Image (cartoon, rainbow, N blue to C red):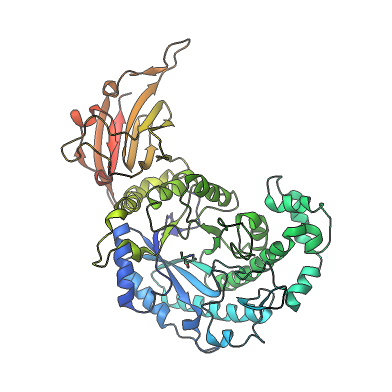
Amino acid sequence: MKTVFYQDGNPFLPFGSQVHNSNVQSPEGLEIFWRAQSALGGNTAEIPIYWEYLEPEEGHFDFSQTDMVLESARKHNSKLILLWFGTWKNGKMEYTPPWVKENPDRFHRVITHDGFRTGVLSSHCKANLNADIAAFTALMNHIKERDDQGTVIAVQVENEPGINARSMRDHGPEGEAEYQADVDAGIMNLLAGLPEKSRVRQAWQEAGGASSGNWRKVFGRHGSEFLSAWSLGTYINNVAKAGKAIHKLPMIVNVWNGDGGFNQPGMDYPSGGAAAKVLDLWKFVSPDIDIIGPDIYLDSIKQNSAVCAAFCRTDNLLFVPESPRWKTNEWAIFNAIGNYDAVGYFMFGAEDILDEQGAPRPELLSTIDSFNMIKDALPLIVEHHGKIHTIIQEEGMAAQLIDLDGYSCSAKFTPPEKLDFRHRYPSIRSGERGRGFLFQTGKNEFYCVGDGFYLDLRKKQDHKGDMVDFENFQKTSHVNFITVENGHFDSEKGWQADYRRNGDDVYYGIWMYADVHVTRFVMQD
Ligand code: DGJ
């Protein structure tokens, strides 16, 4: 598995949930979060550290929140990805300390074209950068000192950075000077080598393909956003680099990708953030950022997949720092990990999956099941990452054809004719999507997790002419299984079979439910 996350030298796939923004103030408050995280079966929690708490007065650091978070994660046997709520939070400066907020003469803000001083710190201001670096490096130093158990596995630098204040760029004196200056020579060199489909290259060509000039000249109407992307990417890379120099952990940047409204930077999404459109620029200026990951809240499979595809690149692994705490995650987690090789996946605001009594909300049981299926299959996912067959029932879909090595397989989303005594017809809880993973681990050996489908397999034959090229083509019941087992993975002993299915219970194919956990089946050669 290609990844940036390791545990004891082995690849590790972090998944789970992120706490609500303001719920990191006491161990008691966090308990609700941990209850939700445990219902999801997650192995890693994403928890913010607020700059306003860390450095209440300039140069005076208070690590009590950080220590509380570390202790709480250890108590719950969880890994941590810390989120640095520093200069930016959702394209604003909400979590900066009062001494930053109250001193705009020193800590410059983004100024709009009509002179309005926004609530966003400017990436062009050195004092902002230096103050953020001082706080972030203090944090990294502290983690290095205190985290002798390796609980913290990565840090997200800032949160959804950019300008979220009806401006594509900072029109203040520093920003204006950068806008009027020639585009950096490194960027000019980069442009010529970018592929045709690159949106950065397309913007350059649309503006006439100039070989030098200021941001307006080189990128035309996109110049303001591109300048902000270049400036923010450089700023945040400097923060990450300073942090890594102290404690070398993977550094992540998350993205509000702008998937709503009119796609207007600064209005519909923060301008200058690492949106898919400007990803080529960001990757170029941020070599110390290990992964740029989109927050994906899209309920349409088509739109959700388009964002996954945009961030799953040879120079950037897909990592999803935030995703819905609603039904969409029934299938979206499978889509990202199975179809787009995501190396990490998180639900935002997990506390919401529980009701007032702390019990899982009935309407979210299928989403909770999906996260637990990922937990059940984790060893297989890590081992077969990039070669997983993903099953997702799209709207109105009755079956999905899967091409296997030596076999053709139809995942059928209609209830099979017969189930066992634990699972009776009608099999599928109303409104749920069939979803899961199928792993081919040998010529005739398979593992499966999932819910709401059954597998119908046919062996491919090498027939010539007009013969149907399957053996056992007539009925599922003609397929011979050597063994079909439900089971689980033990961290020391590996695969453990808990229950064997045979007779009536395999006669109509391998039907999958979350509560059978992992199913392993071996076909006759
Ligand atoms: C995205 C942000 O990154 C989170 O901190 C939170 O504000 C969510 N949006 C709310 O949906």
Residue drawn at point x = 58 percent, y = 78 percent: 132
Q: x, y (%) of residue 94?
A: 53, 77
Q: Nearer the viewer, residue 403 or 228?
A: 228
Q: Residue furthest left?
A: 421
Picture coordinates of residue 340, whole percent (x, y): 50, 46
Q: Nearer the viewer, residue 9 or 186?
A: 186
Name which quarter of the figure residue 497 lies in: top left
Q: Is residue 296 above or below residue 119?
A: above
Position of the C terminus by quadrant: top left
Residue furthest to the top = 465
Q: Is residue 500 left or right of residue 233?
A: left
Foreground residue, 395 or 283?
395
Residue 127 lies, with reference to residue 263, above or below; the image says below
Count every numbered label the image shows and give the total.
Answer: 0
Residue displayed at 76% across by 53% down = 204
Q: Is residue 9 visible?
A: no
Residue 251 at x, y percent in the picture: 53, 65
Q: Is residue 496 above or below residue 445?
A: below
Residue drawn 64% across the image and 85% down it = 104
Q: Is residue 199 left or right of residue 218?
A: left
Q: Is residue 67 left or right of residue 247?
A: left
Which residue is at a point 47% across and 58% down the rendered structure image? 5
Comparing 157 with 210, the one in front is 210
Q: Is residue 114 visible?
A: yes
Q: Does residue 355 sit above or below 197 in this rendering?
A: below
